[in-house]
Amino acid sequence: MMMSGGFKLFSVRGIPIRLHWTFFLVLPYVALGMARQFAAFAASAHTSRDALLLSPGVWGILLAVLLFASVLLHELGHVFVARSQGSPVRGVTLMLLGGVSHIEKVSREPHAEAKMAVVGPIVSVGIALVAYAGHLLLGGIAPDLQFGLFYLAQMNLAIAVFNMLPAFPLDGGRVLRSLLEPRYGRLRATQAAANVGRLLAVAMGIFGVLAGNFLLVLIAVFVWGGGTAEASVALQQEALAGVPVGDVTDTSVGTIGAVASVEQAAATMLATRSPVLIVQARTGDIGLVTAADVARIPEGERGRVPIESLARFDLPIAQASDSAADALDAMGERGLDFAPVVRGTWVIGVLSREAVMRRIQLQGTLHGGLGDRPSAA
Ligand SMILES: [Zn+2]
């Protein structure tokens, strides 16, 4: 799924690791919890507050760092299995109780996906077991280490249990989908797993609000959004399987020379009833300009500004014979809604994300089946 709002920390074997802003919510949460009930935390870890050398504040930060490392190892488990299956990995974004591995073209073979999904929780359980063994061995010898290992085990257990919930887009949801897929097909299996996820998200959200647990509410929102986005991606892939770009290209889009004014572009958009225009530079470059671009120029200045200064010429250009699903994926990766389409060197129109979505929806309605409307998420 797509998740923005993270910044890059470092790379592991060429895979960029990003930290999502929600992760910073964990720090004060853990630190405050520690500060308030340090004695109780120490007692749970079979040690006493007085035996610990480090202060509650330091432990709060340390445990947040350990949580981060635990989530990272969990995600790297997914990533390395995905790579061994031949799926390119674009990066990992670490969030609250889990991360998002950006894996391109997840293997469509159900068992491969289940294997990739299940390895994350296995890593977490492994860490939990090792940490707990260390905790038991160090009992009474090194209270601080005993304390740290106990909560390392707890956190990894929590990560494993949470991620194995049978809710899309969590690992358990992926396993559920792979179990349902042979009987119901990928689309219905995804929808079922996403629906279980939404149901669970609602339950978590309500419980979180009632219990005043802010983190739980945030996780509920994440599960809800992820399930919806994944269902929409599966729907798109299913509907576009084998469809070439040319079949879903909007050919009614107008073309304008790069030296034309923004005012002329606005008039052409109105005439063609299209929110996008193809811009042809004298160099032969093909660009696009959207209604949103035009709107940035005050009406009084539009006659003087050339469209060239607004148009984007760095867009991915789709060949009419390309796979539509792949072209939309490439657009999605760059956050683009439109791409010019060519047949050979001839510009034939524009591939529009929204137009394709409308078409898929219409297809669903006409075939009476798909029901669930793809969201824009
Ligand atoms: Zn996972």
Image (spheres, rainbow, N blue to C red):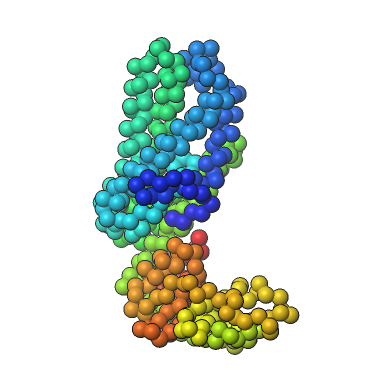
Percent coordinates x, y for residue 32 in the rendering: 59, 29
- Which one is nearer the viewer's eye here, 12 or 273? 12
Q: Residue at x 48, y 48 (%)?
A: 8
Q: Residue at x 50, y 60 (%)?
A: 377
- Which one is nearer the viewer's eye here, 29 or 238? 29
Determine which quarter of the picture holds residue 150.
Answer: top left
Outermost residue to the front: 283
Q: Is residue 370 visible?
A: no
- Which one is nearer the viewer's eye here, 24 or 305? 305
Percent coordinates x, y for residue 15 in the rendering: 38, 50
Determine which quarter of the picture holds residue 238.
Answer: bottom left
Percent coordinates x, y for residue 179 in the rendering: 29, 51
Is residue 253 rendered to the left or right of residue 91? right
Q: Is residue 113 above or below residue 303?
A: above
Q: Residue at x 43, y 36 (%)?
A: 69
Tally the marks.
0
Percent coordinates x, y for residue 16 in the rendering: 42, 49
Q: Is residue 328 visible?
A: yes
Q: Residue at x 49, y 64 (%)?
A: 335
Q: Is residue 52 above or below residue 155?
A: above
- In the rendered image, the quadrant that contains the N terminus is bottom left
